[in-house]
């Protein structure tokens, strides 16, 4: 009987460097921490083996990128390499080498993985200071009229925010526009004054910034900006938070055209209290047009059906397009049924900048 | 960082002297609560600062509730001193080279700190809101309590975080950050250039 072929000996030191460099290059805080945990496949006292296929995901598919090479050279610096090995041999919780955690956070921020960047910076206790630097620089850019860079700065600072009220432990804050959007429409807009999207740009921009940047320390910074700058910034921020805004704007314009045909009916419905609508001798709405009206919120929110509550449409819309919730309003069809319709001021510079006007 | 090193000192909240008497607690609480309620009613931006005012009100209630009862007040001060002593003990052990001992002390301190903050920054604060005398003086009701849950959790975690920011690093090696480089890095981020 012949002996089985010998498996080539693995160079675990090299494998460890590869995995660490890959996690640093990709800003992957989860994989990076795993490599130091008690069950790490690189710990001598761990039963796990890094060379088995189940750990393939820890290794880079390509090593031919500047970011990976830079991370590898950092990992292989003598003092860092020695420190890493000491920690992996140590009994008890390891310390992560700060240089690599910082590099990981930076790469995560470059790649837009803000929750990972926030965790890395939080470990280093520099998150808030970095956030302040980002906001200061963004304000400088805003003052120089560089709107895109300013929006990028505010978006990064927002991404680095932490939620200390998270249960049971603080976590990076994540966008929750779908949770907050219905609050913009908590009062039924029976008149123009009550309709957020029909307010002047200054009022709409303030509401938009409070909603899109939901921390006073962020939105408060923009209060001193010139009205025109605030409009440009708000428009750019809405687009920046939604890479599919152009497609939404197209749907919005179509829905607005459809809504315009029924505006006189809506005005009549809004003139009555909901309980009165049910007992009117002549109903203001022809039941035959109901199916068409119900397609309006469905179009806007890309909902699968046309029989949802108004807040359901708003939530769905805000999830896909955070800024969209600012340009719609509730519309009653009967005492018990409401839909969501597009509504903008014809003279709104913000709506024009967002290509919502027709 | 606040003057009380992160371990809220309820005697400071009520501006009590070192050897305060029960009458001082009641008098200072009523005076401060009245001032706060007047400030809220006169502030046009009170709605925008709701969380801030709710926290101030909750802290006054908690300070009164804890310090009014002699036994509860003494236990609070004892536990506060003990957790501060444990912080010092861990700090002293750090850097002496005994990683095992250091870790044991850190864990003990961390657990004691979490318990202290949970008990005195959250549980007793909510309990105080249900105390008839606090309800009478502050107008605290079920709506306040509902809103306070999130605010107090955030406050407690922030306090924990504040305390930890000044303590020795234990999850990462102590960083030596070059803030000039950080500033350039942020400029690079704002340019939006992502290297391959």
Image: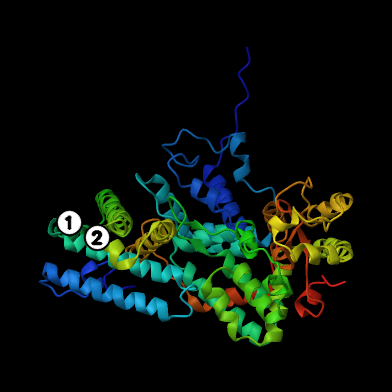
Decide: few, some or many residues near mark 2? Use Cα within 10 Å; few <14, some 14-19, many ≥20. many
Q: Quadrant of the N terminus of chain B?
A: bottom left
Does any portion of residue A100 appear in the rendered image? Answer: no
The residue under the point 36% across, 66% down is B162
Whether residue A337 is visible: yes
**Residue B87: image tag:** 2
Q: Quadrant of residue B89?
A: bottom left
Nearest to the observer: residue B52 or residue B176: B52
Q: Nearer the viewer, residue A77 or A349?
A: A349
Query: In the picture, residue A65 is in which quadrant?
Result: bottom right
The C terminus of chain B lies in which quarter of the figure? bottom right
What residue do we see at 46% from left, 73% from top?
B49
**Sequence-wise first label, 1 or 2:** 1
Label 1 packing within 10 angstroms: few (<14), some (14-19), many (20+)? few
Vertical arrangement, residue B104 with respect to residue B185, above or below: above
Give left or right: position of A92 versus A192.
left
Q: Residue, x 46% and y 59% (percent of image)?
A: A80
In this rendering, is residue A246 above or below A223? above
**Marks 1 and 2: same chain?**
yes
Chain bearing mark 2: B
> At which x and y percent is residue A205?
67, 77
Displayed quadrant of residue B125: bottom left
Q: Secondary structure at mark 2?
A: helix
Chain designation of label 1: B
Camera-near label (1 vs 2) is 1
Residue A132 spot, x, y in % from top left: 51, 75
Q: Secondary structure at mark 1?
A: helix
Mark 1 = which residue? B72
Identify the colour scheme used: rainbow
Looking at the picture, how far across and down is residue A234, in whole percent?
A: 69, 75
Q: Residue, x 28% and y 69% (percent of image)? A: B5
């Amino acid at each position: 009987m012949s002996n089985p072929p010998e498996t080539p000996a693995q160079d675990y030191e090299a494998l460890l460097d590869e995995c660490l460099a890959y996690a640093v290059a990709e800003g992957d805080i989860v994989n990076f921490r795993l490599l130091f945990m008690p069950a790490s496949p690189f710990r001598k006292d761990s039963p796990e083996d890094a060379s088995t296929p189940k750990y393939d995901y820890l290794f880079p598919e390509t090593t031919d990128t500047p970011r990976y090479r830079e991370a590898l050279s950092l990992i292989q610096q003598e003092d860092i390499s020695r420190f890493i090995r000491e920690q992996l041999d140590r009994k008890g919780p390891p310390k992560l080498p700060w240089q690599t955690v910082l590099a990981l956070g930076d790469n995560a921020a470059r790649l837009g993985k803000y929750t990972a960047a926030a965790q890395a910076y939080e470990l280093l206790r520099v998150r808030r200071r970095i956030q302040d630097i980002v906001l200061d620089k963004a304000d400088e850019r805003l003052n120089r009229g560089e709107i895109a860079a300013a929006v990028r700065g505010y978006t990064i600072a927002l991404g680095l925010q932490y939620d200390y009220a998270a249960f049971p432990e603080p976590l990076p804050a994540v966008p929750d526009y779908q949770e907050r959007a219905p609050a913009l429409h908590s009062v039924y807009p029976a008149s123009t004054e009550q309709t957020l999207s029909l307010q002047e740009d200054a009022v709409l921009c303030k509401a938009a910034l409070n909603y899109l940047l939901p921390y006073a320390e962020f939105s408060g910074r923009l209060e001193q900006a010139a009205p025109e700058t605030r409009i440009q910034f708000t428009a750019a921020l809405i687009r920046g938070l939604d890479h599919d805004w152009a497609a939404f704007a197209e749907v919005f314009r179509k829905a607005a055209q459809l809504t315009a045909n029924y505006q006189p009916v809506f005005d009549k419905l809004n003139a009555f209290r909901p309980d009165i609508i049910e007992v009117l001798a002549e109903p203001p709405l022809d039941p035959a047009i109901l199916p068409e009206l119900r397609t309006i919120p469905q179009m806007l929110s890309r909902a699968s059906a046309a029989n949802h509550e108004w807040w359901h449409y708003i939530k769905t819309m805000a999830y896909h397009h955070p800024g969209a919730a600012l340009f719609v309003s509730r519309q009653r069809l009967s005492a018990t049924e409401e839909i969501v319709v597009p509504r903008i001021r014809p003279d709104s510079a913000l709506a024009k900048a967002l290509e919502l006007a027709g | 960082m606040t003057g009380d090193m992160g371990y809220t000192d309820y005697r400071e909240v009520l501006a009590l002297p070192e050897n305060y008497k029960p009458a001082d607690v009641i008098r200072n609480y009523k005076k401060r609560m009245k001032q706060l309620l007047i400030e809220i009613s006169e502030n046009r931006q009170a709605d925008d600062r709701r969380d801030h005012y709710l926290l101030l009100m909750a802290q006054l209630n908690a300070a009164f509730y804890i310090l009014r009862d002699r036994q509860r007040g003494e236990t609070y001060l004892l536990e506060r001193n003990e957790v501060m002593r444990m912080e010092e003990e861990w700090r002293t052990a750090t850097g002496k080279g005994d990683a095992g001992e250091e870790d044991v002390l850190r864990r003990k301190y961390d657990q004691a700190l979490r318990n202290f903050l949970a008990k005195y920054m959250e549980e007793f604060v909510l309990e105080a809101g249900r105390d008839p005398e606090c309800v009478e003086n502050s107008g605290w009701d079920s709506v306040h309590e509902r809103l306070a849950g999130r605010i107090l959790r955030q406050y407690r975690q922030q306090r924990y975080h504040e305390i930890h920011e000044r303590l020795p690093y234990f999850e990462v090696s102590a960083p030596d950050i070059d803030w000039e480089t950080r500033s350039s890095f942020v400029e690079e981020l704002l340019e939006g250039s992502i290297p391959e």
